Image (cartoon, helix red, strand yellow):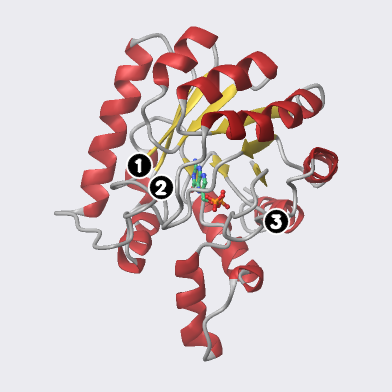
Amino acid sequence: MGVLNVTPDSFSDGGRWLDPDAALRHGLAMVADGADVVDVGGESTRPGAEPVPVDEELRRVVPVIEALAPHVRVSIDTRTAAVAEAALSAGATLVNDVSASLSAVAADGGAGWVAMHMQGDPRTMQQAPAYDDVVADVRRFLVERASAARDAGVEEVWVDPGIGFGKTVDHNLALLRHLADLVATGFPVVVGTSRKSFLGLLTASVHGRRAGPDDRLEASVATAAWAIDQGAAMVRVHDVGETVAAARLLAGTVGRA
Ligand code: HH2
């Protein structure tokens, strides 16, 4: 899943794809690089981000979805029902839902649904994240939401631990280390580590400085490869070509039976 943020303020690519033509070109480039899905988002959910008015979110994403949908499967990355509905009408077939609350929209529209775990909301989620047992708590939440969605008629339900959404570095690492627990639920798992700030902190111990978003490629690819190896069915990434190359390398060498 390639990330296409049509926003002025996303943490790593804010402002780069705000122009619809530039967004379309970048989406098609990710397809050429091997993306099976392009995830279009019109609202940043980085820590501290403020909500975007619905009209503005629609203005950003709908033209880009209409232009991309004939070429590739499109998912809509939103927390807002009206935006998810409009995106499905424009040609998206997957609702990527960081709020894990829009399953009814997916059911009504005959679309797939990604339920992601988030503690709190983007404005405040990194202030003091706390869990009894992060792996068990996230798993329980996702199985509850995913099972309810399936019972309500959503045929394609994915789960995502929500790396960086109300989690400390240790929480993120525990979720990655125990990804197999989530895979064992039987729901296909999506993982998004790409360029996230915990990678900057991890590489600080290697490089002696904290890496910025554009300097987290190796850590992004390494953690995506780890997720795939642990059984994730999809990884959400900015750097599609590099990630696909790494995944193919592993599948064709180490992973070959
Ligand atoms: N992460 C982000 C946004 N959407 N969706 C899923 N399913 N999983 C994720 O981990 C995930 C997500 C945040 O990353 P990004 O879109 O690059 O940044 P921003 O929220 O600033 O636009």
Tell me which amino acid carries mark 1: His
On screen, residue 10 above or below 151: below
Q: For mark 3, give the secondary structure.
A: loop
Residue 155 in sight from this viewpoint: no
Residue type pointed to by label 3: Asp
* Mark 2–mark 1 CB contact (< 8 Å): yes
Picture quarter with the N terminus: top right
Residue on which disc 3 sits: 239
Where is mark 2, residue-wise?
162
Q: What element does badge 2 sit on? A: loop
Q: CA distance from mark 3 to mark 1?
A: 23 Å
Give the label on residue 117, or none: 1
The residue lying toward the viewer, choosing from 119 and 193, is 119
Left or right: 27 in relation to 112: right
When asked about the image quadrant of residue 2, the answer is: top right
Please tell me in which quadrant of the rendered image residue 60 appears.
top right
Q: Which residue is painted at 50% across and 52% down in the image?
A: 227
